[in-house]
Amino acid sequence: MVTLDLRHVASPAVRDLLHLVNHPDFDRAQQQIERLGGCTEPVRLTGNTTTIDTTTGEVLRSYTSSDEPAGSLLTTCGNRRASRCPACSRLYAADTYHLIRAGLSGGKTVPDTVRIHPRVFVTLTAPSFGPVHNRPTTPGGDVRPCRCRKLHEPMDALLGTPLNPATYDYAGAVLFNAHAGALWARFTTYLRREIAARLGMTQKASHAVLRVSFAKVAEYQQRGLVHFHAVIRLDGPHGTGQPPPPYATVAVLTDAVRAAAARVRVAVESDAVGERELTWGEQLDVREIAAFGTDAEITDQAVAAYVAKYATKSADASGTLDRSLFCRPCQGHGATLLPHGTPLPCTTCDGTGQARPLPRLAVARHVRQMIRTCWELGKLPEFAELKLWKWAHMLGFRGHFSTKSRRYSTTLGALRAARRAWRTEQARAHAGLPEPDPDTTLVVGHWAYQGSGYSPGGALLAAHVWHRRELERRFIAEGGCG
C-alpha cells in the first residue's frame, strides 16, 4: 500500500482521490466507475437483491450495496443532454439513431421492406417575430451582408439576436415556443385529413388502407425558437409490415404535408398581448428520403444521424441554460404564490440555490429578455396552465424533444431492455453462475435512492474514463488500428 502525506496536497479532489486509491477495495470502486463509462452525475442506490430457487427455497445469490466501497450501488444518470452528461447523451443519441434508422431501413423487429414505403424528411420552422442578425446567401451560396450591413462570421454572437430589441415581439416568440407542441399535434391531424382528401376518400376509408407514421425531434435556432425535423412515412393499415396502396405516393404525401402545415392555427387571447394566431413559418422544407447507397443527399443513414444529433441537444445550444430556474429550497427567500396558486420562480437564483439575479445570468441579452418575458407572462392567470415560470430556461418550450408515433419502429424502452438483458447475461457469465431457470427462479430486490454524484476523487476518475474512451473513439473514427 502506498503511504503519502496528504497535508501537502492542496486540492480536496486530489486528496480524496489519494484516499480512494489507498482504499483496500479500490479495484472494486474503479470497476464501478469504469462500468459507468464516464457518466458525470451517477445515481447512488442503497438496498439488496436476492435470487431464490422457488422449488427448494435455496438462496442462489445475494447482493447488497453495503458491500461496495462507498456503501452504495452506482448507476448511470441517463440524462440525454450533452451539456449535462456527455457519456449518457452519447448512448441516448445511439439509441435514437437505431430507432430512426429501423423505421427507414428495417431491423429491430421492423421488416426490411419498410424501405420501399413513401417517406419524406420535413422541417417545420417558426415564423418571424422581428428581423434578426443573420448570414444571408446568394443563389450561388456566397454570403451576403446582414441588414445591419455587416458580414457576420459563423460564430458571431450577434447572429440570431434582434436588429432592434425594442420592437422585437418577445411575447409572440415565447408563446410560439410554449404552443409548439400543440402546433405539431394539429399538423398531424390535418396531415391525415389532407392525405384522405387527395386520395378522394373519407378519413375512415383512408385509415382502413394506410397509416401515417412519424418520428420527430425539436431543435433550437440561434434566435431561441424551436423548429421540428420529422421523418414521415406511409404504411399499410397494419403498420410497417405492409406497404400502403400504390396510389399513396411520395408526391401525395409531399403535397399533403405542405397543405397541412399551411392550415395549422392556434389562437391565443389575452388582455396583455391581445388576440394572436400562432402558425408555422414560411420556410417549410419537404424532401424525399432516398434509399441507402444512392447518390442523393437525404438518405436513410444521413437522416438517422441528423435526427440523433439533435436529440441530445437542449435549449442551451441557443445560449440559454440547461436546468430550471425555479428552485424549491429557495421558497424562503424568493418564491411567492400568485392568487391562483401558481408558484413564481425565485428571482435571485438559477436553480442551484446560489444567489444570482437575472441581470447577472451568464446568457446573452436576447436570451435574458426571453427568460424575463416567460416570467412576466407566467404571472398572468390566462397563461397559468403553460407554466412558463417552470420552463423559462427552455424559453417557454415545454414539449418533448423527440417523439414518435406508436408504430413507427421499435421503442427506446425496448432498446434499453435488450441492452440491460445483454449486460446481465455478461455479468452472469463472468461470475461463472449457471443460467437461471425463469420458471423456478425468483429475484427479490429492495432499492432506495440515496443521492447523486461522485465523491471529488471519484469525479476525477470518471473524467479520466470519459477522456480515455473519447480518445479511443476518435482514434477509431480516424481509421486507426492496432
Image (cartoon, rainbow, N blue to C red):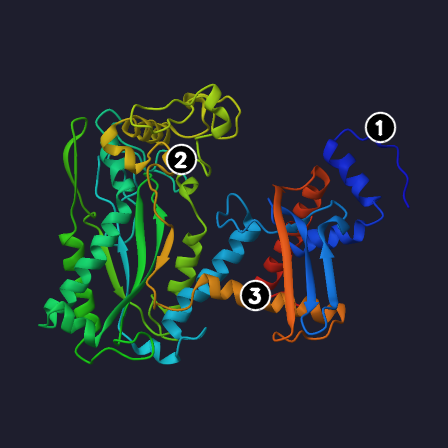
Residue 261 at x, y percent in the picture:
18, 55
- Which picture quadrant has residue 273? top left
Residue 133 at x, y percent in the picture:
29, 36
Residue topped by disc 1: 7
Q: Earlier in the sequence, mark 2 or mark 1?
A: 1
Q: Quadrant of the C terminus?
A: bottom right
Residue topped by disc 3: 419
Residue 390 at x, y percent in the picture:
38, 34
Q: Earlier in the sequence, mark 1 or mark 3?
A: 1
Q: Which residue lies at the image location 20% right of the left edge and 47% below the top edge?
A: 281
In the drawing, what numbered circle is on residue 393?
2
Q: Amino acid at mark 2?
A: His
Q: Residues within 10 Å of mark 3 (few under 14, many from 20)?
A: few
- Which picture quadrant has residue 316? top left
Q: Which residue lies at the image location 13% right of the left edge and 53% below the top edge?
A: 263
In terms of depth relative to the viewer, which is nearer, 171 or 237?
237
Circle nearer the viewer, 3 or 2: 3
